[in-house]
């Protein structure tokens, strides 16, 4: 059986409300718009968890954080959980990762045969939150609003250096794949850290948004006391009292964020250009791990189940899936079974423990009725939060907080909580039943606390004495590259050329 090549393009913290049907018209993203035109576009796609590591582990495995145990940005992704890289590799694919995946623990591959870069974030347990210390703020790794007050222009940053390399390595890999030295089909995942804060952009992209009409949030900042309890916890975790956020700070942050979407568009355009010029065909997927609130109602970054943080762009360009918009709610955990179905790879042996559903039927005009589930159990939470999205409704629950019920068709900015509205009592009760069947919140909370306590002990122990980090060290065998004396020059020049003889 001939299996298709697969290119997965992942970005970080890209707000899905900016992708109502591909990139919004006003975004300067010509390459993403071209990709959107040939893709099935999922307008209501949601992260499994609005934080990097749990969202990515869920996306790769097709399982929620409560199933993977990856609750936060310092929770180990168990090596025994199959990912789409495992499934494809087992079926004969060569699997490769360029960029970020925020794997925590000693396994830094999770089914990838090769990895072209290190990660941008640490692989150890140092960022473990602690439910036993509610209100504790860990300055050296928690977000703060300095990303907002410090927004602006730079020609290089830690994040740009990383993504420049991610794109370069991916392009070099595509060139290498075109040479045909390996007959296996390939899956290449290219994962960027932009447009994740800090909100700093190169001037060429910053200048694109000088007259942008979208620099002010649609929902202005609310007073702290008018926010729901979880949003207040996010404000506290972000050290909001130490910063005075002006309208100009907000506008500059949003401008830099939009500029970095254009920066990513250039990077992705370069990768797609190499793919086209080397005459390789591939299924192409674009997805983000979670969104960014971007100052809406005064909130920034992620950690929230509101739309700006929880909703993500998702596009799939694949034979057999019709280009066009799908409005049914879907999840990033659906990508693992989707990629396997597109590749003709069976997940039957693990499907009883996998909650994701293939998106291929939706891409062929089918329907979906099962709700989309989300979870959050990391910093700024003191007990797990869960949510369900079905049809026009979104329901959230947490043992510490009042329930929330939003009608997203009538109230897309989630400003009116209908949980106590008598006319919606029946809808609320249906969601309560569905949530109770899916989650035991008391058990979920206990498992998170146990995980946190264990990891803190291990981290503190491993920082005593000799330190042997888990961070991935990319391997590059210099003696097998270019021209060396154990090689035949004529063979090297012929084999490394694509196309040959033109």
Image: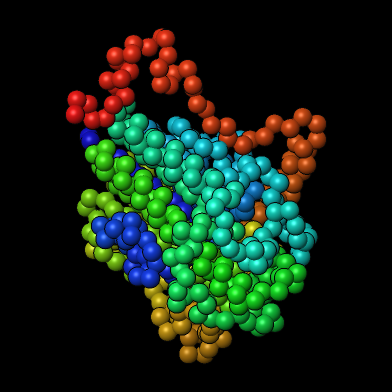
The answer to whether residue 395 is visible is no
Query: Horizontal and vertical percent for residue 418?
Result: 52, 84
In this rendering, the answer to whether 332 lies above or below 280 is below
Please state, as top left, top right, bottom left or bottom right, where the N terminus lies in the image: top left
Q: Quadrant of residue 5?
A: top left
The answer to whether residue 417 is visible is yes
Residue placed at 77% from the left, 61% from the top?
136
Residue placed at 27% from the left, 37% from the top?
278
In this rendering, the answer to whether 351 lies above or below 428 is above
Query: Horizontal and vertical percent for residue 150?
Result: 64, 63
**149 or 60, which is in the foreground?**
149
Q: Residue furthest right?
A: 465
Query: Horizontal and vertical percent for residue 492?
Result: 33, 18
Residue placed at 42% from the left, 9% from the top?
485
Residue placed at 45% from the left, 73% from the top?
212
Please state, as top left, top right, bottom left or bottom right, where the C terminus lies in the image: top left
In this rendering, the answer to whether 353 lies above or below 424 is above
Query: Horizontal and vertical percent for residue 409?
Result: 40, 80
**2 or 67, which is in the foreground?**
2
**401 or 363, which is in the foreground?**
363
Q: Quadrant of residue 51?
A: bottom right
The count of marks equals 0
Residue 307 relative to residue 186: left or right = right
């Amino acid at each position: 059986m001939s299996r298709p090549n697969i290119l997965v393009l992942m970005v970080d913290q890209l707000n899905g409300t900016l992708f109502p049907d591909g990139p919004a018209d006003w975004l300067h993203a010509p390459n993403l718009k071209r990709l959107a035109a040939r893709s099935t576009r999922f307008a209501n796609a949601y992260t499994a968890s609005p934080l990097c590591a749990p969202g990515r582990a869920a996306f790769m495995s097709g399982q929620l954080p409560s199933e993977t145990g990856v609750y936060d940005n310092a929770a180990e992704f168990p090596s025994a959980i199959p990912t789409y890289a495992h499934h494809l590799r087992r079926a004969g694919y060569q699997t490769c990762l360029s960029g970020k995946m925020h794997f925590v623990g000693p396994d830094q591959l999770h089914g990838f045969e090769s990895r072209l870069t290190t990660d941008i974030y640490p692989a150890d347990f140092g960022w473990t939150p602690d439910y036993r210390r509610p209100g504790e703020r860990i300055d050296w790794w928690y977000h703060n609003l300095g990303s907002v007050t410090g927004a602006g222009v730079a020609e290089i940053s830690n994040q740009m250096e990383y993504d420049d390399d991610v794109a370069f390595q991916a392009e070099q890999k595509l060139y290498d794949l075109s040479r045909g030295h390996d007959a296996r089909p390939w899956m290449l995942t290219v994962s960027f850290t932009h447009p994740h804060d800090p909100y700093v952009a190169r001037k060429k992209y910053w200048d694109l948004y000088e007259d942008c009409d979208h620099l002010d949030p649609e929902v202005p900042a609310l007073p702290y006391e008018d926010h729901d309890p979880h949003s207040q916890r996010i404000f506290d975790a972000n050290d909001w009292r130490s910063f005075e956020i002006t309208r100009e700070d907000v506008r500059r942050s949003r401008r830099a964020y939009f500029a970095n979407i254009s920066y990513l568009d250039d990077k992705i355009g370069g990768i797609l250009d190499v793919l086209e010029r080397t005459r390789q065909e591939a299924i192409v997927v674009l997805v983000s791990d979670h969104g960014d609130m971007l100052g809406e109602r005064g909130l920034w970054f992620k950690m929230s189940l509101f739309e700006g943080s929880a909703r993500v762009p998702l596009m799939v360009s694949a034979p057999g899936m019709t280009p066009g918009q799908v409005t049914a709610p879907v999840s990033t955990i659906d990508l693992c079974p989707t990629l396997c179905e597109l590749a003709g790879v069976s997940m039957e042996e693990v499907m009883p423990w996998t909650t994701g559903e293939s998106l291929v039927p939706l891409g062929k005009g089918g329907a979906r009725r099962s709700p989309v589930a989300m979870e959050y159990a990391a910093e700024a939470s003191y007990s797990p939060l869960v949510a369900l999205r079905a049809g026009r409704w979104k329901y959230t629950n947490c043992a510490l907080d009042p329930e929330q019920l939003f009608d997203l068709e009538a109230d897309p900015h989630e400003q009116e909580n209908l949980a106590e509205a008598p006319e919606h009592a029946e809808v609320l009760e249906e969601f309560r039943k569905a949530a109770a069947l899916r989650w035991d919140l008391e058990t979920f909370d206990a498992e998170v606390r146990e995980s946190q306590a264990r990891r803190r002990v291990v981290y503190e122990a491993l920082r005593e004495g000799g330190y042997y980090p888990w961070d991935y060290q990319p391997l590059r065998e210099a003696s097998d590259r270019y021209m060396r004396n154990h090689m035949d020059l004529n063979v090297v020049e012929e084999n490394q050329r694509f196309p040959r003889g033109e």
